[in-house]
Amino acid sequence: MNLKDIEKLIKLVEDSGLSKLSVEEDGIKIELIKEAQEVVSYQPAPVVHQVSVPQAVAPSASAPLVAQVAVEPQNEAGVEMFLSPMVGTYYAQPSPEAPVFVKVGDKVKKGQSLCIIEAMKLFNEIEADYNGTIMEILVNSQDAVEFGQPLFKIKKDA
């Protein structure tokens, strides 16, 4: 892996909705992490570059792949976890001066906007899939979120 390859990877992370990218080639592992930064305006977060070179580690072609499995906590009766449909940055309101889309205790209708997730410099309004009541908001505005990460606990209407 040469410097141009590394620069291409950095550019890829900066221009995408990725929050983390790990690449290993010829015994050299490169991990790029984009960390969220508190800002007043909605600007992309800076990219933090971490490069680690293992000491005398030979690459193994037969190394097994390990899958990470997320275990979803047991839900209370009728309470659903509303999951992030994409990787990006979560925003609780459409602009810094505007009120939040939803608060704990709010009743929401199917199709109602719950939040915005910025992915690849596009602001995507995320809508409720069902009618219910917001029981808990599990992330803070401007947090980086992953695909499938719980955002809200919503008690579904019967």
Image (cartoon, grey):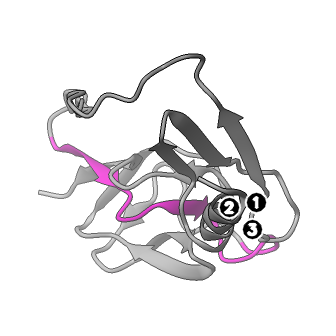
For label 2, count other residues whose C-alpha is less than 10 Å away and answer few (under 14), some (14-19) or many (20+): some
Taking the magenta stretch, the answer to whether it contains residue 82 is yes
Front residue of 139 and 57? 57
**Secondary structure found at label 3:** loop
Tag of residue 44 = 3
Identify the secondary structure beneath mark 1. Answer: loop
Q: Quadrant of residue 107?
A: bottom left
Where 43 falls versus 78 (above or below)? Answer: below
Q: Residue at x 25, y 67 (%)?
A: 131
* Coordinates of residue 157 in the picture (x, y in percent): 19, 58
* Vertical relation: 89 (above or below) 23: below
What residue is at 14 percent from the left and 35 percent from the top?
Answer: 77
Q: Which residue is mark 1?
A: 45
Instruction: Decide: few, some or many residues near mark 1? Use Cα within 10 Å; few <14, some 14-19, many ≥20.
Output: some
* Residue drawn at point x = 75 percent, y = 47 percent: 48
Residue at label 2?
A: 10
Which quarter of the rendering shows the C terminus? bottom left
| Labels 1 and 3 touching (C-beta < 8 A) | yes
In the displayed structure, does residue 31 sit left or right of residue 85? Answer: right
Tell me which segment is drawn in magenta. 78-98
Amino acid of disc 3: Pro
Q: Is residue 76 above or below residue 45?
A: above
Gap in angstroms between the C-alphas marked 1 and 2: 13 Å
Reading the chain from its start, which is encountered first: label 1 or label 2?
Answer: 2
